[in-house]
């Protein structure tokens, strides 16, 4: 019975240990999980759940393991026969429990580390979003004037102050990244570094844009101050120019002197403004030297400022010169008036015809006249001064002289231009005459050359006939022939005139087989039609006609003109130059234009034409 009780207790312990080991194994699956979540919210949820799991598992497991250990200790203490096996089971269950506790601790640390990593990426994302938000708040607005610009500068200063906390957050991201990189390696370390670089680059870009914005606002402030200074100078110069151009006309010398004094006062004021003007110019040049964004506008303002200053100086000089001229004229008028008054006052004395009644009275008159002559001598300098030309007269004389010189110069240029055009016209006429002479000489030379060649050909033919040379079969079998009373061959024809002063409606070239016989030109479609003794398509008498080489027609070669007695006119094109001359000659012969020796010569020379398009038939 005791043995059975021990065996029962042993099996009961074994069942409890198996259940405990299965429970521990189930908990190990949860404690050994590698899931760390996808973001900070998920990992925090996992930490919360695992914290509850660890607490429940530790409490429950501790109780179960303690109870199992107590049973094992009791059985071993009572001297159970399988005490060694029970001790081994106890050690195994305690080891499994220790492993589970270790897994729980490892899992806790893993989740905490994951939370730190996800928190880093979360914080970095938030900082990036804040940086982009701040960057989007930056604008390019520079205001419309100095007041609106100052408001923008105040807003920008507040914006810069708001960046200080963001800078602290960027520094915290950098520190956290450095700490995490010591705990991770491989891809995670690269991700941490990449995210840190992204945050730092965005922060640097934001600081660069803030700096650019600060400099741009500063440049805009300088620009608006410069534009205000330019506007002030322009207003002053316009006002001064208005004073110079608007004035009252003086009526006498004192009035002119008052105007001159006022004009000199304006000169003093202009000179006093020179320093402020140069300060404005220096301000603009300094902005240009800094590569200011509004450099084209600044250059335009400086050019406008200098133009107005030059215009002001020029108008002041013109006005000063005019006042000096008016003063001189007024002084002349005043002196002339005084002199005229003095002369009028002296006229009664000079008109006095009293010559004295006795010696004493005459002597008194002589003495009085001597005094008068002395008075006249004292006034001589005044009259000489009046005779001197005034500046106005000198200028007017100079202007007239320059005008006269200009007219003379224009007249010389006109004469020279007309002479040049006349010479050019004469040169063109001379060249045309030379060209015409050269063309005529070439034409005469060509005709003489053709005549020499024709004479040589006729001599060869005569020699051949004398030697009994006969034409070859090839020479006989050609498309044209010539006899003393008949000539035929192919010609191209183009109608040009249907009647005197009326052009032909259709002026096209067309080929015909032409037979000249009995002072009539017969036109056939081709040689076969002519040999069949068919009626000609049409005919044309040569009596009282006119034929010549068409030297004025240059589109085709070997062309001659034929004009009938009815006024019709045609152009014919022969095969070559010799064939053309032969046709012209035979047409003239047909109505007796050439002499008998010429026809005889033609008969002797018929052999040479047989080698061309037409030949003589024996």
Image (spheres, rainbow, N blue to C red):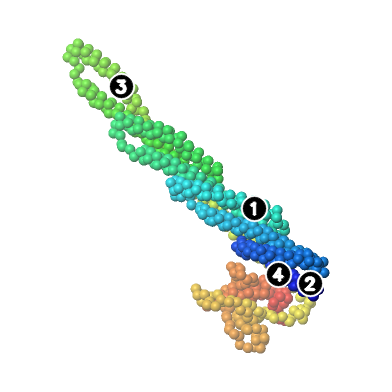
Image disc number at residue 379? 3
Task: Look at mark 2 in the image and give the residue it sits on.
Answer: 6
Q: Nearer the viewer, residue 313 or 238?
A: 238
Report the Cα–Cα distance between label 3 and label 4.
149 Å
Q: Residue at 21% x, 13% y: name it.
A: 364
Badge 4 element: helix
Above or below 484: residue 301: above
Where does residue 399 sit, x and y in percent of width and height? 41, 38
Report the Cα–Cα distance between label 4 and label 2.
26 Å
Q: Residue at 78% x, 77% y: name it.
A: 469
The label nearer to you, 4 versus 2, is 2
Task: Look at mark 4 in the image and give the residue it sits on.
Answer: 23
| Residue 28 visible here | no
Where does residue 313 sit, x and y in percent of width and height? 43, 37
| Residue 233 visible here | yes
The label nearer to you, 2 versus 3, is 2
């Amino acid at each position: 019975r005791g043995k059975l009780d021990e065996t029962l207790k042993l099996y009961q312990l074994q069942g409890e240990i198996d259940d405990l080991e299965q429970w521990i194994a189930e908990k190990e699956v949860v404690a050994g999980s590698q899931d760390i979540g996808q973001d900070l919210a998920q990992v925090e949820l996992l930490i919360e759940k695992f914290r509850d799991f660890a607490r429940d598992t530790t409490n429950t497991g501790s109780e179960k393991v303690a109870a199992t250990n107590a049973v094992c200790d009791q059985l071993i203490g009572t001297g159970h026969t399988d005490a060694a096996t029970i001790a081994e089971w106890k050690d195994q269950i305690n080891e499994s429990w220790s492993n589970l506790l270790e897994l729980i601790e490892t899992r806790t640390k893993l989740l905490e580390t994951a939370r730190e990593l996800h928190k880093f990426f979360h914080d970095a994302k938030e900082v990036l979003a804040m940086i982009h938000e701040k960057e989007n708040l930056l604008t390019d607005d520079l205001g419309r004037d100095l007041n609106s610009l100052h408001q923008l500068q105040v807003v920008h200063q507040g914006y810069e102050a708001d960046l200080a906390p963001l800078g602290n957050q960027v520094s915290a991201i950098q520190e956290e990244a450095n700490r995490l990189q010591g705990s991770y390696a491989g891809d995670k370390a690269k991700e941490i570094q990449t995210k840190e670089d992204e945050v730092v680059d965005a922060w640097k870009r934001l600081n660069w844009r803030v700096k650019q914005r600060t400099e741009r606002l500063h440049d805009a402030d300088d620009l608006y101050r410069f534009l205000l200074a330019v506007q002030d100078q322009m207003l002053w110069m316009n006002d001064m120019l208005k004073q110079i151009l608007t004035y009252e006309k003086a009526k006498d010398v004192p009035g002119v002197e008052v105007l001159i004094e006022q004009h000199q006062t304006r000169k003093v004021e202009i000179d006093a403004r020179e320093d402020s003007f140069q300060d404005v110019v220096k301000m603009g040049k300094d902005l240009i030297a800094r590569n200011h964004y509004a450099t084209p506008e600044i250059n335009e303002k400086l050019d406008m400022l200098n133009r107005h200053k030059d215009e002001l100086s020029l108008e002041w000089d013109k006005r000063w010169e005019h006042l000096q001229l008016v003063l001189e004229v007024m002084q002349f008028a005043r002196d002339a008036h005084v002199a005229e008054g003095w002369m009028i006052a002296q006229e009664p004395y000079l008109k006095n015809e009293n010559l004295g009644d006795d010696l004493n009275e005459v002597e008194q008159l002589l003495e009085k006249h001597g005094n008068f002559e002395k008075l006249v001598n004292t006034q001589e300098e005044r009259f000489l001064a009046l005779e001197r030309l005034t500046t106005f007269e000198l200028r007017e004389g100079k202007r007239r002289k320059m005008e006269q010189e200009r007219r003379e110069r224009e007249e010389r240029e006109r004469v020279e231009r007309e002479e040049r055009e006349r010479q050019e016209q004469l040169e063109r006429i001379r060249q045309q005459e030379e060209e015409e002479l050269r063309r005529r000489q070439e034409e005469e030379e060509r005709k003489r050359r053709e005549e020499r060649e024709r004479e040589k050909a006729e001599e060869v033919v005569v020699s051949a006939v004398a030697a009994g040379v006969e034409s070859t079969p090839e020479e006989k079998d050609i498309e044209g022939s010539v006899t003393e009373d008949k000539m035929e061959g192919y010609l191209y024809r183009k109608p040009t005139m249907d009647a005197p002063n009326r052009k032909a409606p259709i002026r096209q070239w067309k080929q015909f087989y032409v037979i000249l016989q009995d002072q009539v030109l017969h036109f056939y479609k081709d040689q076969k039609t002519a040999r069949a003794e068919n009626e000609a398509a049409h005919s044309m008498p040569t009596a009282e006609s006119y034929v010549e080489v068409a030297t004025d027609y240059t589109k085709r070669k070997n062309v001659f003109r034929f004009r009938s007695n009815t006024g019709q006119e045609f152009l014919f094109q022969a095969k070559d130059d010799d064939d053309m001359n032969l046709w012209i000659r035979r047409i003239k012969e047909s109505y007796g234009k050439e002499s008998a020796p010429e026809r005889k010569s033609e008969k002797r020379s018929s052999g040479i034409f047989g080698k061309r398009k037409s030949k003589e038939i024996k």
